[in-house]
Image (cartoon, rainbow, N blue to C red):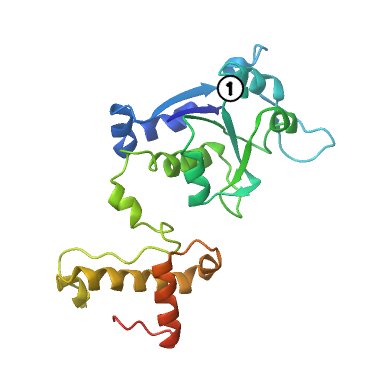
Amino acid sequence: MRFHILTLFPEIMEGYFSASVMARAIKKRLIDYNLINIRNFAEDKHKTCDDYPYGGGAGMVLKPEPMAMALDSIDADKLRTIYPTPGGKLFSQEYAEKLAEEKELIIICGRYEGIDQRIIDLYVDDEISLGDYILSSGEIAALVIVDVVSRLIEGVINRDSLEEESFSNGILEYPHYTRPVEFRGLRVPDILLSGHHAEIEKWRLKQGLEKTMKNRPDLLQSGRISDRVERILREFEHNGGKNGAD
């Protein structure tokens, strides 16, 4: 997977690609990236990339000319182009899985009040929102998308880890414990020390379901929960919301 990222501040992105999981993925040639400084395509001596919005209003808007030239330099018309914006479709694990099927992605990092609508009309395939809040930096939003998508690429993350994560079976992930067995009066649940793997798996599913019901009940209406989780949900409801494995 190759990411082309258009940004006014490429230095924000560099640290992410040079450390931890991403650095290893790049070394193994599973991931590649191309940071494109939009300012390099501004033709005036001040490298101006923004201007006041027509119709008035606060803030500035990224100009279309430098952005278009930057996009043309990487043949954007042939690649899937993404623009993170609060006005886009909500990003999700399912959405990320579809993006991970691409060999290359272009991500436009917005700033200020956003980018000229004509760039969206001419180039953008996906307007993506990370949630109902506003970020000052399109770079941060771009990195979230890169992180979520790249860890779905074969070999970047252990496949077993991916299958047990939140949203993988339609619910949130179960709680985790490590050594010591007791910490400040709180013990690791006995089931996790039992060695009974089938019972541990069932306990984890129930814990994940209970957490989902508490924090994200909307996920249970999404239609993405597995048949096994649905059976446990019915059992959970039959017991009046009590987790029989506690």
Q: Residue at x 54, y 22 (%)?
A: 37
Q: Quadrant of the N terminus?
A: top left
Q: Quadrant of residue 107?
A: top right
Secondary structure beneath dot 1 equals helix
Q: Residue at x 64, y 23 (%)?
A: 67
Place of residue 224 in the rendered image (x, y in percent of width and height, measured from the top left):
50, 61
- Vertical order, 186 against 63 (above or below): below
Q: Residues within 10 Å of mark 1 (few under 14, many from 20)?
A: many
| Any part of residue 187 in sight | no
Q: Quadrant of residue 13?
A: top left
Place of residue 34 in the rendered image (x, y in percent of width and height, measured from the top left):
46, 23
Q: Nearer the viewer, residue 236 or 12?
A: 236
Q: Which residue is mark 1?
A: 38
- Vertical order, 169 against 151 (above or below): below
201 on left or right of 63: left
* Residue lying at the far right of the rendered structure: 55
Place of residue 186 in the rendered image (x, y in percent of width and height, measured from the top left):
22, 76
152 on left or right of 155: right
Q: Nearer the viewer, residue 89 or 138?
A: 89
Q: Residue at x 49, y 33 (%)?
A: 102
- Vertical order, 227 against 185 (above or below): above
Q: Quadrant of residue 237?
A: bottom left
Q: How many marks?
A: 1
* Circle 1: residue type: Ile
Q: Quadrant of the C terminus?
A: bottom left
Q: Nearer the viewer, residue 46 or 212?
A: 212
Place of residue 244 in the rendered image (x, y in percent of width and height, measured from the top left):
32, 84
| Any part of residue 100 in sight | yes
